[in-house]
Image (cartoon, rainbow, N blue to C red):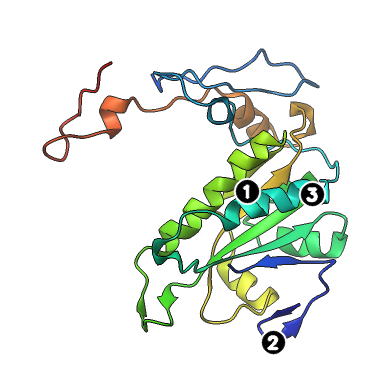
């Protein structure tokens, strides 16, 4: 495979360029997988109510078919004008060198807990629509929409994801010889959820077990003028 003029083995990399009030959680026990089912204002699909972003992952390898299914869900995400100005660089833990190299692209606060995740992903965006020779104002939005498909498909396959903004952009560009047309956006850890005791840092164990609250619909849905709650009611 060719990236930025440099060849990589496809065994190493998979590259694709194409009330909401109060979130409860199950009783905490070391050695037990933590769950945080949503307490929604109205019923929504269980893939959404069960989705959350754990930091504790097991080192269990991910079946290739499941990985491909998650990436296929990304491929079919909505894209403005269908230009799909995104790319995803994927490494698997079974290639220790490639996995460690991607860990080095993460900021320190993100380095300890993703180390066990069997799959790490970097997301990229091409902000210039080359065919039209102009900025694509929706490019970052589109890559985030595509990335949002991952946790939903992963949830359907009994997998979990955790998206990270804390990345070293310069390190990524140098390490992967990223062409100037693309910019890194985020990193994603994916795999089978682990238990709390797999987290080595107290701060991560605390963050993992904290209840998750969400803003109410009245706080985020507006009507008439900006700042005026829509006051939705059944």
Image disc number at residue 65: 3
Q: Is residue 64 left or right of residue 228?
A: right
Q: Which of the two discs, 2 and 3, labels the residue nearer the N terminus? A: 2
Quadrant location of the N terminus in the rendered image: bottom right
Mark 2 lies on residue: 5
Q: Secondary structure at mark 1?
A: helix
Q: Which of the two discs, 2 and 1, labels the residue nearer the N terminus? A: 2
Q: Quadrant of residue 228?
A: top left
Q: CA distance from mark 3 to mark 1?
A: 31 Å
Question: Which of these two is toward me, 163 or 233?
Answer: 233
Q: Position of residue 69 (x, y in %)?
A: 70, 49
Q: Residue at x 58, y 73 (%)?
A: 170
Question: Which of these two is toward me, 151 or 227?
Answer: 151
Q: Position of residue 49 (x, y in %)?
A: 54, 25
Q: Residue at x 79, y 33 (%)?
A: 198
Can the viewer see residue 161? yes
Graded by Cα atoms within 10 Å as few (under 14), some (14 to 19) or many (20 or more), the crowding at tag 1 reads: few
């Amino acid at each position: 495979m060719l990236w930025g003029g440099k060849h990589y083995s496809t065994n190493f990399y998979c590259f694709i360029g194409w009330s909401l009030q109060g979130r409860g959680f199950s009783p905490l026990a070391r050695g037990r997988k933590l769950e945080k089912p949503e307490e929604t204002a109205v019923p929504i699909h269980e893939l959404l109510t069960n989705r959350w972003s754990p930091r504790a992952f097991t080192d269990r390898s991910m079946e290739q078919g499941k990985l491909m299914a998650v990436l296929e869900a990304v491929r079919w995400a909505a894209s403005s004008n269908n230009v799909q100005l995104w790319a995803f660089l994927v490494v698997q833990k079974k290639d220790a060198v490639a996995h460690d190299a991607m860990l080095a692209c993460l900021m320190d606060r993100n380095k300890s807990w993703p180390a066990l995740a069997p799959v790490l992903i970097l997301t990229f965006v091409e902000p210039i629509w080359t065919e039209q020779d102009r900025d694509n104002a929706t490019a970052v939005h589109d890559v985030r929409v595509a990335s949002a498909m991952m946790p939903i498909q992963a949830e359907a396959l009994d997998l979990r994801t955790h998206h990270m903004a804390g990345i070293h952009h310069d390190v990524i560009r140098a390490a992967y010889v990223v062409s100037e047309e693309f910019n890194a956006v985020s990193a994603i850890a994916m795999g089978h959820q682990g238990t709390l005791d797999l987290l080595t840092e107290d701060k991560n164990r605390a963050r993992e077990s904290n209840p998750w609250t969400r803003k109410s619909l009245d706080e985020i849905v507006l009507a008439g003028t900006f700042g005026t709650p829509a006051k939705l009611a059944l």
